[in-house]
Amino acid sequence: MPPTPPPAVELTPGPVSFGDVVAVARDGAPVVLSAEALAGIDRARGVVEALAAAETPTYGVSTGFGALATRHIPTEMRAQLQRSLVRSHAAGSGPEVEREVVRALMLLRLSTLATGHTGVRREVAQLLAALLRHGITPVVHEYGSLGCSGDLAPLSHCALALMGEGPVRDATGELVPAADALAAAGLAPVELRAKEGLALINGTDGMLGMLVLALEDLRMLLRTADVAAALSVEALLGTDRVFAAELAALRPHPGIAASAANLTRILAESGVVASHRGPDCNRVQDAYSLRCAPAVHGAARDTVEHAARVAERELSSAIDNPVVVGDRVESNGNFHGAPVGYVLDFLAIAAADVASMSERRTDRSLDRARNHGLPPFLADDPGVDSGHMIAQYTQAAIVSELKRLAVPASVDSIPSSAMQEDHVAMGWSAARKLRRSVDGLTRVVAIEVLTAARALDLRAPLTPSPATGAVVRLLREAGIAGPGPDRHLAPEIETAVGLVASGAVVEAVEDTIGELQ
């Protein structure tokens, strides 16, 4: 039987949720406009049409745009004005952006239209919803947005599809002309009228969509990083005492408390930890990469929650310029991407640091001088076999890249539009590099899980905790064999990456000990 389609997301004049964004972007959920949203759209359109009929020029309704805003456009040329705006601004270049990003962008633009502050006709909003419902995804390119006025070029490529122009991907992923995809779905393109082109392209929707998706991934990855750290603590004969709640409470950051609590619970009932807990243990302190894991993981968690609060405010926003307020249209600067760009950059810093600590734990597991009795590089026959030596090289290469990606994009600005737009946000660029950072962190943590699991097997007959033992079983059941002679390692790394990215590693732990924080 075919899978049950996800329930529709209904847009009201209020904000969409993180779950709504993920459902539409990743699960293909359809979108519908509520009666309240349609009523607000109609009301705002009435205001725009009244201003369009007036003799006094109104920016975005009867004038040009940007540095050309001083020109009054005659009524008979305003449809051409909207077409020209969208066509000229659909000027992206480079590789196609991922389908989930484009769907998130489209949803968030539609959410702003649903607030009743943009002045589009209801048929324009309904056509955008129909594209999402039919799985029609406009081709959006990597380069083109300066993050101010919002994500102009990416949104323009989506608006172009509403006009029946430009390339799109249909529901099967095939590249087809927009006109053909619309016709196949029984849809007709729209001819944009006064203000509608501008309302479709003037927002922070691309960078915000990528922020929401990254937050979804990072929340899962930071729980996985706690799991990976616990595996390494066991493998390296570390202590769990440093994660005690009474110690975490001395530094009352919420993220530290959550990470320390996770590590304590994951390591509970560990035979490995118990084996060196008695008076004969001569260990004084574990290395920072072990005992300070809650400080780094916790700081990253708190950064994620700060970014989530910014995202929540942005999801509650109506981003357009000009906006319909009451019975008038007002110019504003709310489209500037700085609030979103800053936290996108901040998250890239956190991802790089968590990955850096993960790589250090892996390196320690492979070094005979520091791994407390394990073979060099966890090799079966050291010298003949190299074990996980080069897996750590891969981690190191990724971590080095993550450090470069942590350099902020939002501090850059290149003036545009004949100096009318003389300070821009670069939020789209910050979001694009964060996606690469999230992927890199996933891979680094996966290699730590893979290596620490091998090290735990080599600790036999000592037994891991029930939680970490469940992770080792997950890897083995997925086809990753235990210790032995060297074999092709890249496929095992990719399998581990898939288990981390899907959330299966966290799920294996939570099925054993309950939900992690």
Image: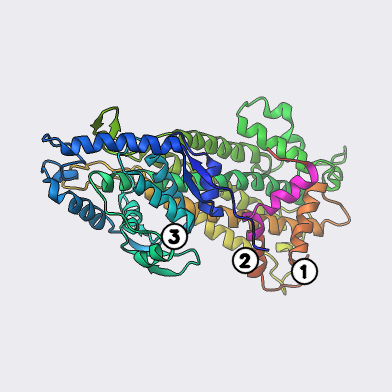
Residue type at the position of mark 1: Asp
The residue located at (27%, 59%) in the rendering is 91
In magenta, the rendered stretch is: 498-513
**Can residue 357 be found in the magenta stretch?**
no
Compared across the picture, whether 19 is left or right of 260 comes to left
Q: Is residue 401 above or below residue 254?
A: below
The residue located at (22%, 51%) in the rendering is 82
Q: Label 3: state its secondary structure.
A: loop
Residue 102 at least partly seen: no
Q: Residues within 10 Å of mark 3 (few under 14, many from 20)?
A: many
Disc sitting over residue 380 in the figure? 1
Residue type at the position of mark 2: Ile
Mark closest to the chain's N terminus, 1 or 3: 3
- Residue at mark 1 to residue at mark 3: CA–CA distance: 52 Å
The residue beneath circle 2 is 390
Mark closest to the chain's N terminus, 2 or 1: 1
Q: Is residue 199 above or below residue 85?
A: above
Q: Position of residue 318 (x, y in %)?
A: 37, 36
Of 189 and 224, nearer the camera is 189
Of 226 and 108, nearer the camera is 108
Image quadrant assignment for residue 510:
top right
The residue beneath circle 3 is 136
Mark closest to the chain's N terminus, 3 or 2: 3
Q: Decide: marks 2, 1 in contact (CB < 8 A)? A: no
Disc sitting over residue 253 in the figure? none
Q: Position of residue 298 (x, y in %)?
A: 61, 37
- Residue at mark 2 to residue at mark 1: CA–CA distance: 15 Å
Q: Label 1: state its secondary structure.
A: loop
